[in-house]
Image (spheres, rainbow, N blue to C red):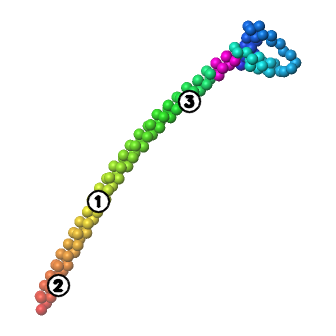
Amino acid sequence: ASVAVALTVLGAGFANQTEVKANGDGSPREVIEDLAANNPAIQNIRLRHENKYLKARLENAMEVAGRDFKRAEELEKAKQALEDQRKDLETKLKELQQDYDLAKESTSWDRQRLEKELEEKKEALELAIDQASR
């Protein structure tokens, strides 16, 4: 890349009638950088290249952001579905708890009734045995 820039600088220098010479004041890289910094044509080429690079990065970032946004929407929908399912299960649990409590109460009442009947029959049987033994 530096060779291409150097050739571009030299070509631009010749096209603008700019004198390009290497003196002992700096390295060839410094000379090229100085020429590039002072040449609008080279600055334009560098800026176009940088602009192209930045546009590509921006497009990539926008694509990633779009995918992330779409994924976030999908996750939000899944979360809402799970929340709805949780509410349904909570409602069913309450209904089942009510049914269980009612069945438990009914069973308790039936047991008390049966125990009372059993006690009455036991008393009647004891009375019958007591009368028979006299």
- In this view, the residue in front, 93 or 18, is 18
Q: Residue 48 location, x and y as percent?
A: 64, 18
- For residue 74, side relative to residue 39 (left or right): left
Measured in 3D between alpha carbons, the distance from the residue under mark 3 to the one under mark 2, in whole angstroms, is 94 Å
Return the disc, 1 or 2, that comes first in the chain's sequence: 1
- For residue 17, side relative to residue 65 (left or right): right
Q: Which residue is disc 2 drawn over?
A: 126
Q: Which residue is disc 3 drawn over?
A: 61
Decide: is 99 above or below 36. below
- For residue 33, side relative to residue 58 (left or right): right
For the record, the magenta segment spans 43-50
Decide: is 77 above or below 19. below
Measured in 3D between alpha carbons, the distance from the residue under mark 3 to the one under mark 1, in whole angstroms, is 55 Å
Residue 76 sits in quarter? top left
Please check the rendered image and state whether residue 49 is part of the magenta-colored stretch, yes or no. Answer: yes
The 10 Å Cα crowd at callout 1, few under 14, some 14 to 19, many 20 or more, is few
Q: Secondary structure at mark 3?
A: helix
Hey, what amino acid is under mark 1?
Gln
Residue 11 sits in quarter? top right
